[in-house]
Image (spheres, grey):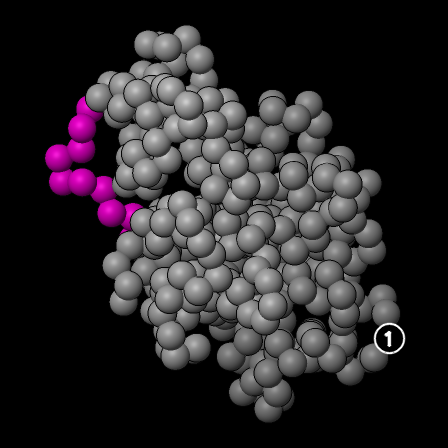
Amino acid sequence: MATLKTPANSPSPRDDAMQLYQAFKGRGCETSVIINILAHRNATQRGLIEQEYETKYSEELSKRLYSELHGHLKKAVVLWMNDPVTRDAKILAQALRGSLTDHKAVTEVICTRTTAQLRQIKQVYSKDYGTTPEHDIESKCYGDHKRLLLAYLNTTRYEGPEIDNVLVEADATTLHTAISKKHGGEDKVFIQIFSERSKAHLAALGSAYRKMYGKFLGKAIRHETSGNFEHALLTILQCSENPAFYFAKVLRKAMKGLGTDDTTLIRIIMTRVEVDMKYIKAEYRKKYGKTLNDAVHSDTSGHYRTFLLSLLGPNH
C-alpha cells in the first residue's frame, strides 16, 4: 500500500547515524544529506538509526534535528521521525493543547483510526503528556462534537468486512426517522450509530440509505447538522466509503487558493505515506486532473519541497 521508496540495500543504521552526525558538523548542516537519508527509510529503520545515534553520540537525534533545521522542514522532519502511534499522539496533543484548538486535526486522528490504534494512542498520550485525551477533549471541545469524539475514542468496533444487512437497513430507517423529526435531541442517534458501527457497515449504510430514501446520507448530514459535529460525521462516513478520496480532498483544500495550510499538508503526508499514499495520489489525479506531486511542487519550495516530494515518490 505504501509509496515510500527505500533502497534495496539500505546502509546499516550505524552508517546512517554516522552520516547524519557528519552532516551536522560545521557551520550550518548539510540538509540534503539529512533529507536523502531520512526520506528513504521506513519507520523501523528510522527507529534503529535513532538508537544507534543516541548510543554513539549520547544525544537524541530528534533533538539535534530540531536544533539544526528550520521552518516547515523542521516541523515535517521532526514529526516524521516518530513511530506512527507516537506521531498520532503528538498531533492530537498539539491540536488539543495549543492556544487554539485544531478541531479538524483532532477529528481526523480520532475518527480515521482503528479501535486498536486508538487504544495505543491513548496509552502513549497518557505516558507522554501526563493526562488523557478524554480529559483534554472534555475541556477543549464542546456539544455533540465532543460527545461523538469521546464515544468514538472509547467504543470497541468490529473492523472486519462482514455486515448484517438487516441491521444496516434498520439503522437507515432509524437515521431517516431521526432526520425527519427535524429537531435537536436526535443527534444521539447519529452519535450511537457512527461511533459503534464498523466501516464496512457504515459504507453499506450510505448505500442502503440512498436506495431506500433516494437521498445521499452525506447530504442529509450536511442539512441536519453543522460545524465540527457535521465535519466529524462526514469524516467517519467518507473514510468508511473511500479513505483515499477523503485524504485527497483534505490535501486539495490545504493547497487551494492563496497561501498553503502547511500544518495540514505536513500532517497528512507524514501520517499517510506509509499507509495508503498510493491510493490517495490516484484519487487526487482522478478528481483534480493533476498529480499530487505537481500540486505540492507548486505550493512549496526549497528543502521543504524536496523532502515532501522525496516522501511522495514518483510523479504519477
Image point (52%, 44%), residue name: 72
On the image, the x and y values in percent for residue 85 come to 49, 36
Can residue 86 be seen from the camera position used here?
Answer: yes
Residue to which mark 1 is pinned: 183
| Left or right for 301, reference 51 | right
Foreground residue, 313 or 241?
313
Regarding mark 1 in the picture, which secondary structure is present there? loop
Q: Is residue 10 magenta?
A: yes
Foreground pick, 72 / 281: 72
In the rendered image of this protein, does residue 291 appear above or below residue 36?
Answer: below
Specify the quadrant that holds the N terminus: bottom left
Which region of the structure is painted magenta? 2-13
Q: Main secondary structure of the magenta part?
A: loop
Query: What residue is drawn where x is 53% and y is 65%?
Result: 255
Give x and y (percent) for residue 66.
51, 28
Residue 191 counted in the magenta span? no
Q: Is residue 136 left or right of residue 218?
A: right
Q: Is residue 305 above or below residue 252?
A: above
The amino acid on which the numbered mark 1 sits, given as a three-letter code, is His
Q: Nearer the viewer, residue 85 or 42?
A: 42
Would you identify the image quadrant in which residue 34 lies?
top left
